[in-house]
Image: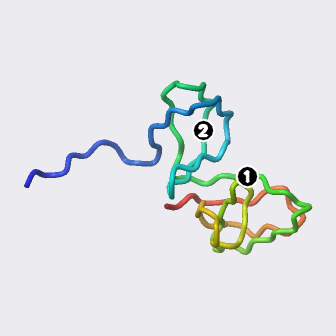
Amino acid sequence: MSAAEFVHDGSAIDHTPVADLATGEIVVQGDLVGITRRAIKADTLGSIAVEGVFDVPKDPVAAVAFTAGQKVYVDGSNEPQTTATGNKLLGKAVLAAAAGDESVRVRLSQ
């Protein structure tokens, strides 16, 4: 059996989008969820962060609140949610976010 070979620390992974992505966009690849740190043009190799702490925009009208340490999921429109069913894990809230807040601070975790 051959040994595994170290490639990199894994805080970001390669990603080639089919459409242009702006900075700060959430990218879902199966169960892997990351966020762009820079804009990436379509069909161009870039990377998405899979570690780090990000302020993720949320809809204050949707009235979703988070407590510090609570798991944060994203739905099909990449809107932060509190429920796992039908959604993908983004990470954990590192600060409480009230229902009317415009963002939730999330530590990415896979």
Residue type indicated by callout 2: Arg
Q: Position of residue 53 (x, y in %)?
A: 61, 54
Q: Amino acid at mark 1?
A: Ser
The correct choice, above or below, for 77 with respect to 110 in the image is above
Residue at 61% across / 33% down in the picture?
A: 38
Q: Which mark is residue 37?
A: 2
Percent x, y for residue 36?
60, 40
Closer-to-camera residue (29/55):
29
Would you say the residues marked 1 and 2 are in contact, meaning their CB atoms lie under 8 Å apart?
A: no
The furthest residue to the left: 1
Compare residues 69 and 29 and report the one nearer the observer. Answer: 29
The mark closer to the camera, 1 or 2, is 1
In the shown orientation, is residue 92 left or right of residue 45?
right
Name the secondary structure under disc 2: loop
Name which residue lies at 20% across and 46% down: 5
Residue displayed at 57% across by 50% down: 28
* Residue 30 disc label: none
Q: Is residue 54 left or right of residue 43?
A: right
Question: Residue 92's x, y, as percent?
Answer: 61, 67
Judged from the image, the secondary structure of the residue bearing numbered disc 1 is: loop
Q: Residues within 10 Å of mark 1 (few under 14, many from 20)?
A: few
Q: Which of the labelled discs sits on residue 77, or is there none?
A: 1
